[in-house]
Every structure is written in C-alpha cells, then in structure tokens.
Image (spheres, rainbow, N blue to C red):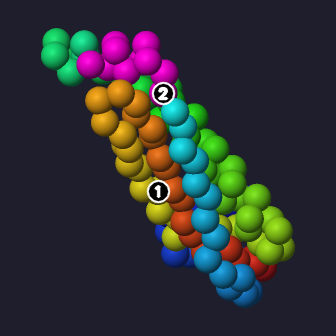
Amino acid sequence: MIVTTTGSIEGRRIVSYLGLVYGESIMGTNIFKDLFASVRDIVGGRSAAYEEEMGNARAHALAALEARAKRLGADAIIGVHLDTEAIGGDKRTLLMVSATGTAVKVG
C-alpha cells in the first residue's frame, strides 16, 4: 500500500476516492521511563525511552490507518497527517498518535 503525505502519487492516476481513514494509538509509559525522562528534563539531553515509545505509537497508528484503508479496498492513502500528544500529569504519561488520510484507488 502506498502511504504518502502528498495529495497525489507521481506517475499514478487516482481512480476513486474511498473516504477518510484514521488510525490511533495511545501508549502508556511506565514509571521508570517517566522517572528517567524527568531527570533528562533537569539535566538536558534526549530521552531514548520516550523516542522509542513514540516510534512504536506512530507505527501502530499507521498500521491501523492502513488496515482501515484495506477494508475499503484502497490501493493507497494520500494526504496523510500525523498528530502527536502527551496526555497525563505528574503520575502517568500517555503518548497518543493519530494518523488521518484519504483512502484511494489508483490506476
């Protein structure tokens, strides 16, 4: 399946638009990742643990997006947009990624 952020696919013609598709992923972090991230906030630097969780959340959201498009009979998804959000407070952080796009048939 072709997945692109653009509104068209070079060299391919969009035959039909099948509708909006979406995929979401909300991933919980654990207390140790939260603790180490808090230390990183103080001393600076990158948090590999959070980067890994964000990558996992993104992959799950895109997989859900593709699954919905396949159920519609799509060959591709165009105009894909990813949104990320950290939900939570002092005790627990959830990472949310949502992916949206337009499912299409291409010729």
Q: Is residue 55 visible?
A: no
Which-is-in-front pick, marks 1 and 2? 2
In the image, 4 versus 39, the foreground residue is: 39
What is the span of residues highlighted in magenta in the rendered image? 29-38
Left or right of 92, for residue 77: right
| Residue at 54%, 44% in the rendered image | 26
Identity of the residue drawn at 38% across and 44% down? 87
Q: In what element is the residue under mark 1?
A: strand
SS class, disc 2: loop
Which numbered disc flags the more N-terminal residue, 1 or 2? 2
Residue 42 coordinates in the image, percent (x, y): 16, 16
Q: Please name the residue that numbered disc 1 is placed on.
A: 82
Residue reaching furthest bottom? 16
* For residue 67, side relative to residue 52 (left or right): right
The answer to whether residue 31 is magenta is yes
Q: Residue at x 34, y 13 (%)?
A: 36
Which is the main secondary structure of the residues drawn in magenta? helix
Quadrant for the C terminus, please. Answer: bottom right
Q: Amino acid at mark 2?
A: Thr
Considering depth in this image, is 105 or 54 the residue closer to the camera?
54
> In the image, what residue type sits under mark 1?
Leu
> What is the quadrant of residue 17 in the picture?
bottom right
The quarter of the image holding the N terminus is: bottom right
